[in-house]
Amino acid sequence: MFYHAEQTIKTLSTALKRIADNVMITDPKGIIEYVNPAFETTTGYLSQEVVGQTPRILRSGQHGASYYKKLWETILAGQVFRATTTNKRKNGDIYYADQTISPVHDDNGQIVCFVSVWNDVTERALAEEKLKAEKKKLEQVLGIEAGLHSIFDLNKLIDFVVEKTCEVLEAQTCSVMFIDHDSNELCIKGHRGIEELKIGEDFLKMGDNIEHLIDQHRKTKNRDRSFRNEDSPKIDGHVYQSETFLSVPIELKDHLLGIINVFDKKGKDSGHFTDLDLRILFMIVRQVRIAIENANLYRELKYLTITDPLTGVYNYRYLTQTLDYEMTRFKRYGRNLAFLMMDVDKFKIYNDSFGHLEGDKLLKAIAKLIKQNIREADVVCRYAGDEFAVILPETDLDQARVTAEKIRKSIAEMSAKCPVSVSIGVAECTSDTNRYHLIQRADSHLYTAKQEGKNQVSG
């Protein structure tokens, strides 16, 4: 007996009205001919709104053309197509459906219609997505742990933590602050996303608000607190966009070292951090604490003054303050600004060969030579270990290269236990540059100079 699509639909419609599954029947060209009441409830579309349309009205945009190509190839070949499909309701909400599309044949083997049956599995799919996201974040945290164990300089460790914390927690803003008990201040040691003008101006005294803040940090939680109000306290002088923030204390042997703050959540959860985010931040801080202790970096925390005690040049803290100040001047007045990063070539070999005392003498001598080859207005800082940085106000890229070459040549000609050289990366400030990017650009050129044979200037 031969059945047309219309006859098939009439035969099935009574039964389909009673079942909980969503059902949609289309003709061989994909035109919708019937939907059951469950379909109307799930999608928000009434039968009369979809009959005569194609299933494209349900598309979410999350499946590519290859997905639909495979679907049609399967059902036109007379086979059943099965998949978890992401569709869109009438109101625009996304839902997930475990779907089968089956071709119906007449007695001659011709396809007369397609029957699509599915269950709404949105709750399950979202739970699975959440688990995947959690797993990804935990894997990223493990990556942070591995990275921390290979860093033996406090400044680099903090920069690494700030960068990775923003990445894992999808945050625009992060600051790491340490307590300088001598000056009774909370000092910003590393940051991302904070207004450049604020750094160096807003070291926080341990006044009433800060003492209360520290007490609260010992009872850390995810605070729902708006920072849009200008009268609200700002932890590090920055105006924040998010309604929630995370703050976790950094403690070592029951001694409070400082605080890590995370603000300005990005992505679909914009503005709101989750309990998972807080747990992950605790994990990161725990790893930081272990790294500081294992690498014997705790002693460095007391050096929050502006001078490096070994070489006598300025330290990393002063570098960040001065660079932020000069970048503000650059952006305000349009004056040139350049930056040098340099690293002593084969310094570890020098240290291993002649001992740490000789290594320290070499660093002092190099710092002295750098100062002799720059202007009074320029600022030389010890960035980390055997790395030095020079801030060159009102200097363009060509002039910076000349200065870098003078420094390189002077050090190559110095008297030491064995020949000594430095590799130097040069970067110029541009209108779209922040401190982090300027340092990163110079560091990248420094890496190039190293890779291309050392004892040279790149940038």
Image: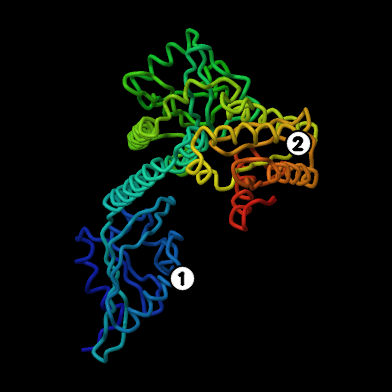
Residue 30 image offset from top left, x and y in percent? 40, 74
Q: Residues within 10 Å of mark 2 (few under 14, many from 20)?
A: some
Can I make out residue 430 in this image? no
Above or below — where is 434 with respect to 27?
above
- Residue 217 in view in this figure: yes
Vertical placement of residue 73 versus 199, above or below: below
Chosen colour scheme: rainbow
Of the numbered discs 2 and 1, the one sitting upstream in the chain is 1
Residue at left offset 63%, top offset 26%: 314
Q: Answer left or right for 89 relative to 342.
A: left
Amino acid, disc 2: Asn
Where residue 316 sits, quadrant-wise, is: top right
Q: Amino acid at mark 1?
A: Ala
Q: Position of residue 162 (x, y in %)?
A: 48, 36
Depth check, front residue: 3 or 180: 180
Q: Position of residue 370 (x, y in %)?
A: 70, 35
Q: Position of residue 295 (x, y in %)?
A: 39, 34
As rendered, which of 40 and 220 lies closer to the eye? 220
Residue at the disc numbered 2 = 373
Q: Is residue 9 above or below residue 18?
A: below
Give the position of the N terminus as an image quadrant: bottom left
Q: What SS does tag 1 mark? A: helix
Mark 1 highlights which residue? 65
Is 422 positioned to the left or the right of 292 in the image?
right
- Image quadrant in which you'd find residue 395: top right
Q: Secondary structure at mark 2?
A: loop
Residue farthest to the top, as pictured: 208
The residue lying at 52 percent from left, 22 percent from top is 303
114 lies above or below 83: below
- As drawn, is 52 to the left or to the right of 120? right
Q: Residue at x 43, y 16 (%)?
A: 213
